[in-house]
Image: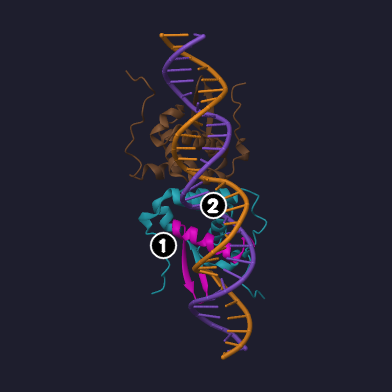
Chain colours: A brown, B cyan, C orange, D purple
Amino acid sequence: MTNYLPHPDTEDIALPNVLAALGDETRLTMIAILARNSEKAMSCGQFLQLGSKTALSYHVAKLREAGVIQVRPEGTKRMLTLRRDDLEKRFPGFLDSVVASVDATPDPQQWTGVPETTGGA
Amino acid sequence: MTNYLPHPDTEDIALPNVLAALGDETRLTMIAILARNSEKAMSCGQFLQLGSKTALSYHVAKLREAGVIQVRPEGTKRMLTLRRDDLEKRFPGFLDSVVASVDATPDPQQWTGVPETTGGA
DNA sequence: ATCTTAGTTCAACGATCATTGAACATTAAG
DNA sequence: CTTAATGTTCAATGATCGTTGAACTAAGAT
């Protein structure tokens, strides 16, 4: 019984919800980072540059409830992955165009180097 | 001096704003209708099925300020057009994928027949 | 001038948003 | 067991959202 967090089924992902979820700078930045890291899962903590723990918890819930990300508990962490395939199935070409557009915007790219989990060397 | 309503320049159209503007059922429906009518301009009044005059005025302003539509006063009316080319230039493929996704959703399509301006036959 | 059409502005309202800080829960490590 | 790491929950807060109704403006039509 891993995965007790509610995620919408693929066919229940609704476009207005997805658009609203991405219509926030912090969350849009998060999915851009996740997309850049392709299929590697990331923990919430890796986004602390973008806000407080509480704020991130809130944004992660929004993205999860909209069906944009998958949240998988792993120990004390929550591993996040983009629901790429589900979104592509439901809204073909949409996610790619969004991510490409974000990447083409020079503004939020100072932190292009994604921070490591605590304890690098 | 037509066009005294403020529209963002193409290069100033921001993705989060566009996403937020489309992240509302009423407004998403509006742009889907506009897209279906391709380049023919539509008046605000043609959307009265979607809300009150006041509500529409509000939504039209949101879409205009986000850079999604062009609003051109014509007599007592406001003619609306999608800023297709500007959006395509700024966010390639984005609008098409959104519109295609809306059209693929059976829910908001009862009114597929777009209403005429007052005085059909 | 009067009336109609088409849309705007304004104040109000309840709802949701995004954030904060404090307290709590869960898992892991010493 | 104690401590640390990682997130969640809760209540509060100020801001923004989407809607309403009443009043208003601007442009045509009679």
Residue at x-position 49% and y-position 61%:
B61
Above or below — where is B71 with respect to B87?
A: below
Q: Quadrant of residue A32?
A: top left
Where does residue A43 sit, x and y in percent of width and height?
46, 27
Residue B106 belongs to magenta span: no
Residue type pointed to by label 1: His
Q: At 48% across and 49% down in the image, what residue appears? A: B19
Mark 1 crowd level (few <14, some 14–19, many ≥20, 10 Å Cα): some
**Residues at marks 2 and 1, CA–CA distance in whole angstroms:** 22 Å
Which chain letter matches label 1?
B
Q: Are marks 2 and 1 on the same chain?
A: yes
Q: Position of residue A30 (x, y in %)?
A: 44, 37
Q: Residue A27 versus residue C10: which sits nearer the camera? A: C10
Q: Which of the 4 quarters of the picture holds residue C3?
A: bottom right
The three-letter code of the residue at mark 2 reads: Val
Residues A83 and B27: in front is B27
Q: Nearer the viewer, residue C2 or A7?
A: C2
Q: Which residue is mark 2?
A: B99
Q: Which residue is mark 1?
A: B7
Residue A93 appears in the figure: no
Element under disc 1? loop
- Disc with the residue nearer the chain's start (2 vs 1): 1
Chain part drawn in magenta? B49-78
